[in-house]
Structure formats: C-alpha cells, structure tokens
Image: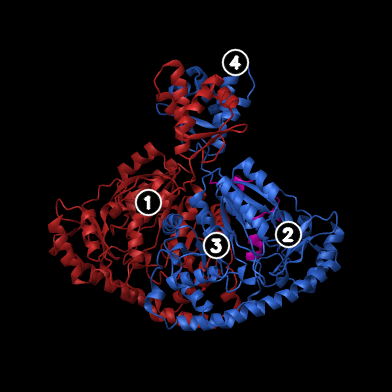
Chain colours: A red, B blue
Amino acid sequence: MERQLARETADPADTLIGTLMATIRRRIASRSLTPGARLPSIRALAAAMQVSKSTVVEAYERLAAEGAIRSRPGSGYFVAAPMAPLSLADIGPRLDREVDPLWISRQSLDAGDTMLKPGCGWLPASWMPQEAMRRGLRTLSRTADATLADYGTPLGLRPLRELMVRRMGGHGIVAAPEQVMLTESGTQAIDLICRYLLDAGDTVLVDDPCYFNFHALLRAHRARVVSVPYRPDGPDIERFAAALEEHRPRLYLTNSGIHNPTGASLSPVTAHRLLKLADQHDLVIVEDDIFADFELTPAPRLAAFDGLERVIAIGSFSKTLSASVRCGYVAARPEWLEGLVDLKIATSFGGSHFAEALVLALLTDGSYRKHLEALRTRLARTLAGTAARLEAVGIVPWLMPQAGMFLWCRLPDGADAGKVARHALAEGIVLAPGNAFSLSQTAHGFMRFNVAQSDDARIYQVLEAALQRV
Amino acid sequence: MERQLARETADPADTLIGTLMATIRRRIASRSLTPGARLPSIRALAAAMQVSKSTVVEAYERLAAEGAIRSRPGSGYFVAAPMAPLSLADIGPRLDREVDPLWISRQSLDAGDTMLKPGCGWLPASWMPQEAMRRGLRTLSRTADATLADYGTPLGLRPLRELMVRRMGGHGIVAAPEQVMLTESGTQAIDLICRYLLDAGDTVLVDDPCYFNFHALLRAHRARVVSVPYRPDGPDIERFAAALEEHRPRLYLTNSGIHNPTGASLSPVTAHRLLKLADQHDLVIVEDDIFADFELTPAPRLAAFDGLERVIAIGSFSKTLSASVRCGYVAARPEWLEGLVDLKIATSFGGSHFAEALVLALLTDGSYRKHLEALRTRLARTLAGTAARLEAVGIVPWLMPQAGMFLWCRLPDGADAGKVARHALAEGIVLAPGNAFSLSQTAHGFMRFNVAQSDDARIYQVLEAALQRV
C-alpha cells in the first residue's frame, strides 16, 4: 500500500482523495477487503491516514458512485461486489488453455481409452504390478476388522513408516519413524508443507522447467513464484544464488533424482553449493522423490547431505505401484512434523488407513523388487526407441535421461508446442507442451513425452502433420 | 490498520513514530510482512503515510534496535524474525489442551485398543459392515486393470456420482451428476470449499456447539469464526439474523439432520427462515450430511429448499461404511464445481479411484440397506441404555436425539468437563468435553458421548469418581 500511495502525483486535495480511492480499490482487488466487508469508519480512516473527514467522505462517495462500494444508511460503507468466488484463474496470469497446467491435468485425467496420452505423467495400467495388487486385495480381505473400518493414526501405519525410514536410509537419509507422516498423496504432502510454511505472498523458487502441477498448487496458495533455469546437473547455481538475493524465497521445490520434466539428475557438486546457499539464506527445500524407484544410479539427495534440517523429503508410490490407491509420505524435522500432523487432521481428518495397509502389503510382497527391475529394463528400452522415433520427425531430446519415463524434447526450429498440442488434441492425442512447465514461458519450443505412453504410430503421424502445419 | 492507527493517542512527534512502529509490528505479527520481507523504502513510506522521512528513519531504527527488523546496508530494511513456521496454535487462541479440538482428535485417533473412547466420533469396527467390505475387496481383486492402477477422473467415478444424485434425490435435493465431485473425505470437501470461497480474514458462521474439527479447519484457513447458539430445532434464528447483520459472514457451516454434537435436527420453519436470511445477506451455506444414513425420519435439507443455489451439500461414508476407505462428495452449482475441481487437482491430483470403486461396490452390494436398518435399531437401543446409565451418575442428555450415535449431556452443576476429561484420560478413557465444540467456550458443563463406544462399565465408574473429585 505504501509504495502505491507514494507513486501518486502531487495535487493537494484531489491527490489525497485519489490516493485513498486507489488504496481502497486495490484492497478490494487483492481481496484484503472482501465483498460485503465493512469499510473503516470515516472518523477512523481520517485519523489513520492523517486526512480530513471530508476527504474520506468524498473518496467513499466517489467509490460508491463507481459501484465499487455501497453505503448503508446508519451502518456505514461496504464492499459492493457480488460474491464472486476466487478461482485459480484469478490468482495467477491466465495462460493459454493449451499450456495451462490444470488444463493438461484435466485433459489427461479425463481422457477415455480412445485417447492417446504421450503428454501424461504416469505409466499405462498394464505396466503396473496388477497381480501383486490383486494378491494384496485378497490378503486384505482377510485382515483385521480395524484395518478395514477404522480411521488411520495421525502419523499413519507404523510398519509402513518404518519401511519408509529404511528406504530413505538407502539414499543416505537418516530419519526416525516419528519424523515420517503418511499422506493421501505426494501432492497432499507438498500442499500441507505449503500450508504450514507459507503465507500468502511468500515467494517460492521452482525449477524452469518443473512439474506443471507445482505451478497450479502454488497458485492455489497465492505464493509468488520465481524460477531458475534447470541444467543437466541441477539448477543453474549462479542464477539460483541471484534469485535468493533478490527474492528471498521461503521454499524451493525440486526433484533431485530424475527431474520432471527433463529427466536430469542433480550432481553432488551442485547439491553442495545449493545447500550452502540455502543455509546462508535460511531457505527450506522440499525434495520430491516420487521417481526414486526408477533410478538406476541414485542421484545425491539434498535430504541426505542436510540431515532433514532444512530439507523436507516427500514421495509417493503413484508412479510404480498404483495411482488409484493414494498414499504418500513426508519426512521432516520433528517440530515441523507436529504442525503438519495437526494440519493433516484439520483438513482431511487422518489419512487413508486402507491405502496405507495396501501399500505396505505391496511393498513387502516380495515381488516389488522384481517388478521394479523389469520396469527399469522396459523403460530403458522404450526411452531409446522413442527417442529414435521422435528424432525421425525432427524432435530431439534435450538430454538422454539415465532412467525414468520422460523425454524433454526440442521441437524443430520455429514450431510452437502449444499449437502442436492443440492440433494433436483435435486428433485425440493429449500432449504436454513446454510452457506448461515453464514459469518464464520460454519453453514454447519444447515438449515432454512419456515414453511408456508413446508407442502408437499415430502419435508420430500426427506430430509430423502438426509440425508441417504450424 | 486504519482503526489501529486511529486508536493511538495524540503527542505529535513521538505519536507518529509510535504509530508507525505499532503498524509495522502488527503487520509482522499478522504475517502480512513475513520474515525476510523487505520493508517499504523510507521515501515511499514517508510519502504514503504523509510523514517526514526522518520519522520513518526513527521508527525503523527503533524497530531494528528491538530486533524486529534488520538493516542491510545498501538494500534497505527487512523483517528479522528467524523462520518460524506458522502453526495452528498461532492462528487461534490456544485453548486448554483438554478442550483443544486437535488434541481430542489426536487422542482419539492415536488411542490403542486398551483405551476406551466414549469421546470419539465413530462406531467400533465391529459395528461396521465387515463382511460386505471383505466381499467388496474380493470383487475388486478381479476388476479391470485401470481401476487398480490409474488415477481417477477429475469429478470421480461417474456411476458413484449418479448414485449420489439418486440418494440426494431421496432428500429432495435435485442435482445433475455433473454437479457432484467426489473427494477423499467429507473434511477434504469442506476444505476445498473454504479454499475456493474464503479469503484470509473472511468470517464464517458455525453452530455453538458444533463439530470440533470445524474449528480446527477454519483456524487453518485463518477465517474469523462467529457462532450462534444451536437449539433443538436449528440455530437460534434471532441470533443468526443479528450475526449476519453484524459480521456479514461469507459461509455458514452446519449439519441439518442429526446435528453434531447435539443430535438435534433442523425444523422446516427454521430452515425456511434461515434460507430467507441467507438470501438477504448473500450467505453461502455448507450442509454437511455425514450422518444422513442414521436418520429414521429425515430432517429437511437446506439444499433441497434452495436447489443448490447458495447451499453446497457434502457428505461421506466414514460413519456407516468405513473410515479406513476415504471417500466423500460435494454437490454445488455448476460454476463453483469447476473451480473446486481445479483446486482438487492442484492440491491432491485427482481423488482416490480405488476408494471410489470400493464405496460403489459396497453401496450397490445389496446388503447396505439391511446393514443400515440393523445399525439404526442397535443405535436406538444403545441411545436409551446409555442415557439411563449416564443419568445414574448425574449426567443428563440435553435432548434425546431421534437417531444417531451422539448424546450431548449436561454434567452435574459445578462440574467442569475439561477437568473430568483430564482425570479420565489418566484412567485410559478419552472423553469429549463440551468446550471443544463451543466457540464461545460456554459449554464447560457439557460433554458429548458416543453411545456405541460407551458400553464398558469402567467408563461410568471413572466418570463417577471424576465428578466427585472435580
């Protein structure tokens, strides 16, 4: 408010009125004054702003004439706008539909079996461990009553938390089971962390490009988002340092192993520099480890170097077990975990007891390791094959990832990914154009391909035709 | 801010400095200025507040001396507080642990099998339809791959949404399947609505008493909460009208059928008056129908009279099917539903496909109606029996509910429910003292009993002993 006020030009009486009006308008627009809210009394506002009462009266009357506020005789002035719910679109800039992160999510989630989805972020159902899942359900159909009927515990099923601790230990992350909370998804885990650590207007740092739902989630939190270019070995560390200096972000959200969408992995030297900078600037890091089980050679984990001091580790099993059964986890320093548990109960009343029991059954079934090995081999083969097929139509990977399901690709010069995506959608193909992943909107020449969803020859025919047209 | 400023006393130079300091301190406390945030420049703030630059410098210097802000040569002043995450406790007044809603939730959710839980809000596992559940799991173990592996659709499983439409139809609520979104719980449904409709500082109206997790949830949204006394036929309508006039709430959160904790039900005449007032004041109502299936004679539904214009209907199956399998729903006007779907995807990426499929299997299993009939009969018998046992130790129901699991009871004169609860906890019994449900903190002489969890004779022995002590 102060800066806005200071920017007005100087013409005594009218300036004061105009300044007041601008301030109030801005507070309505930013919803710090919400529809129906009572405005400060004339006397109070005059005293506060060190102006005369007649100045306030004049400002209020002009705003009422504009329809921005309403006078109710005897009770004062109120914000007049009809109740218009806040939508995500109001929060951030409205992007083109084709590169709107929510639009891509909804298209992918809504796509029927007739659609092809090289743009989606998950494996086909047939790649998932169906037999283990069916076995798990039969096992649970014989389990104790409480598992089937009762709410879960605040932290979640202890044996599954212990298993998470052992898994993290394999990546060098030392945590106690009391530092792990199970959630209904990795996304819920990030959401709870944002609720806990962020205030409206706080700044969050993301990679450019990054997983597009980070943009949608941070928009829902009304966070200011700042991005730093991602390189093949992690974020551009010079730009990262500059962003910390300039924007003083509170959080940094990233994937260290198999970065989404690039498939890159953090190098040890970048990890160390990054943590040093985080220390200097009191930055909290959320390390989303959702692709951990795809890795052939594990990337260094920030949470391992840091010891869960300022790094929060999260993950889920949506990519390797089932996205239908929702279960994620978060590991953090003990005092933060307390607050996260309170928020989880307040906003979802416990986790999904049943999903926790099923994930535990699946992870301890004995077949999970074999499933992963088969999956990695299949993905490695498919990565190479898909890269070759894409290159044949002029689409070239930015890098060849060591593992995972994503290829982040550059389109031929001059091609616009948004236009290609629009064309493909008309042909029944959901793509993921680069700018959905890019806060700076500099990835219009890029596209993310899910190699496990890119087998159909029609995809390449449609891509070729679209590239010739646009 | 204006009112705060206006309240300061008048002593020219020091007052101005003091006023500025108080304003900045308050903005830091309310986190409108967050730790690390840059303060307005001296020039800008002086211009905005119409004070001299030296006044601003003096205010900043004094705040820096206090340690509230930090000067960084060449780049200005910054909020100095070390990163202290926002906790729920910071948001609302800290209640006594014994009547803190989150504390009761956590005690109940964490209680092992050795604890007795007359204070909890759910049925014992043995009362739930275990056989149907086991059957449902066996059925799903033979279902299609996609049901077991894929994310759900944005709105959720269509056959289950159609079933919700038919159920609501039975209560006179007319909705299309496109107006129904499935969620991971009834709590998540309310949470999404709050995210969609509320802004920090907006006012929400609740019943006094009301379900205690409403308090925790609204605290997480930093909403201002105002309560209206609940009567045996709905909220006190005069007080309701006065609260609308005075506080202009944006939302009202309530249960119409079998109100939690009182067991009361809304009368048609109160429902009509309430909706008329809501129209006049542009109030949105969230009607939480979680206890619908316990009712013997259905209470009128606000959503039925209103036609889902300004009423949003929500519900779940945690109380009658399973709290382990998480699935809720929300029905609202179509344009709001769009925004709710976007928020659901942004913050939890789809719903629980598997839970939706399982709930659908259970509701269409053919045994659900019989399960409900048996449950209602058993609860009616248990209600009467528990009331008699409580009266024997001097604890008297406020009203005898027509159905449900709760008895809202008055303790003998002078007894404090918080103290009784503390005493009982030491004896391994989790109770639910009245003030956890009461925003006005006027229910210290009340307690909610779950009759299905109150069979053990030790409960009455401990209550009797506690009442003699406190």
Please give the residue where the numbered disc 4 appears in the rendered image. Answer: B12
Q: Residue at x 19, y 70 (%)?
A: A458
- Give a yes or no on whether discs 2 and 4 share a subunit: yes
Magenta region, residue range: B85-109
Helix, strand or loop for disc 4: helix
Q: Label 2 vs label 3: CA separation?
A: 22 Å
Magenta region includes residue B86: yes
Amino acid under disc 3: Ile
Closer to the N terminus: mark 2 or mark 3?
Answer: 2
Q: Chain of mark 3?
A: B
Helix, strand or loop for disc 3: strand
**Residue B157 located left or right of residue B260:** left
Q: Label 1 vs label 3: CA separation?
A: 28 Å
Q: Position of residue B182 (x, y in %)?
A: 48, 65
- Look at the image and tell me whether residue A140 can be seen: yes
Closer to the N terminus: mark 2 or mark 4?
Answer: 4
Q: Residue at x 33, y 66 (%)?
A: A295
Amino acid under disc 2: Pro
Please give the residue where the numbered disc 3 appears in the rendered image. Answer: B314
Determine whether A155 is above or below B248 in the image: below
Q: Label 2 vs label 1: CA separation?
A: 47 Å
Please give the residue where the numbered disc 1 appears in the rendered image. Answer: A215
Amino acid under disc 1: His
For marks 1 and 3, give the one nearer the viewer: 3
Closer to the N terminus: mark 3 or mark 4?
Answer: 4
For marks 3 and 4, give the one nearer the viewer: 3
What secondary structure predominates along the stretch shown in magenta?
A: helix
The 10 Å Cα crowd at callout 1, few under 14, some 14 to 19, many 20 or more, is many
| Residue B106, quarter of the rendered image | bottom right
